[in-house]
Each structure stands twice: as C-alpha cells, then as structure tokens.
Amino acid sequence: MEVYGALIMRVKARMDAGEDTPDCLVKTLLLNQEREKLDWEDMCMLVSAFIIGGIYSVTGPLSLSPMRLTNRQIVVYRLRVLSCGS
C-alpha cells in the first residue's frame, strides 16, 4: 500500500497541478475512480497486479538487444509505465 499508494499520489499531484500527464494506468484509474466505484485499496491492488504479474520475466519489451535484464530493472520499468513516468 505504501509503495503503490505513493505512486498513485505522485500522478494525482501532477494532474492536480495541471501538468501534462501522459496516459497510463494510474491516470485512467484516477479519472474513473468515481464511475468505477474504486476505493484506495482497489486502486493500489490494481496497480500492483500489473507489476507482480511479470516480475519473474528476465527479458521482455525492454530488450532491444539480447541482453538479460534483472527482475529489479523490469519492476522499475513497469512502475514507470504504470505511473506515467513519475
């Protein structure tokens, strides 16, 4: 809750400040929170599900070369994608 909640709050702060925020999962959740009746725990769990789902991959969309990626690199990349790069 602490990690994913902070991620959500960073994106929310950017949106509230009127910054141009690229489309991402967190932005979509925030914009549709009322309509979808999402509470805080719902949003944190949805964000974490996309990261946990692929945490054990060692290669993926990041690999433009045949290099091997660590789990930490993949998690950091997924966090950036999910949170509009925050």
Image: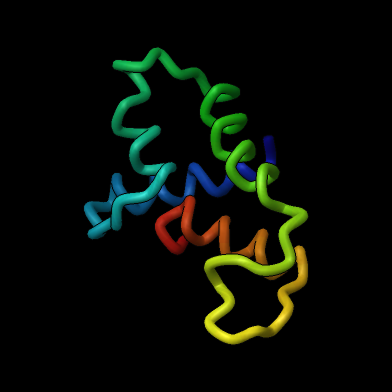
**Residue 81 horizontal side relative to residue 6, left or right:** left
Q: Tell me where residue 63 appears, x and y as whole percent.
A: 58, 77
Q: Quadrant of residue 50?
A: top right
In the foreground, 84 or 56: 56
**Residue 40 horizontal side relative to residue 73, left or right:** left
- Residue at the image position 43 percent from the left and 42 percent from the top: 26
- Residue reaching furthest to the top: 37
Which quadrant of the figure contains the N terminus?
Answer: top right
- Residue at the image position 40 percent from the left and 57 percent from the top: 84
In the foreground, 36 or 57: 57
Q: With respect to residue 1, does 80 lie above or below?
A: below
Q: Tell me where residue 75 appears, x and y as whole percent.
A: 67, 59
Number of numbered discs overlaid on the protein picture: 0
Q: Quadrant of residue 32?
A: top left
**Residue 85 horizontal side relative to residue 73, left or right:** left
In the foreground, 5 or 68: 68
- Residue reaching furthest to the front: 66
In the foreground, 11 or 82: 82
Q: Tell me where residue 54 appears, x and y as whole percent.
A: 67, 50
- Residue at the image position 62 percent from the left and 36 percent from the top: 49
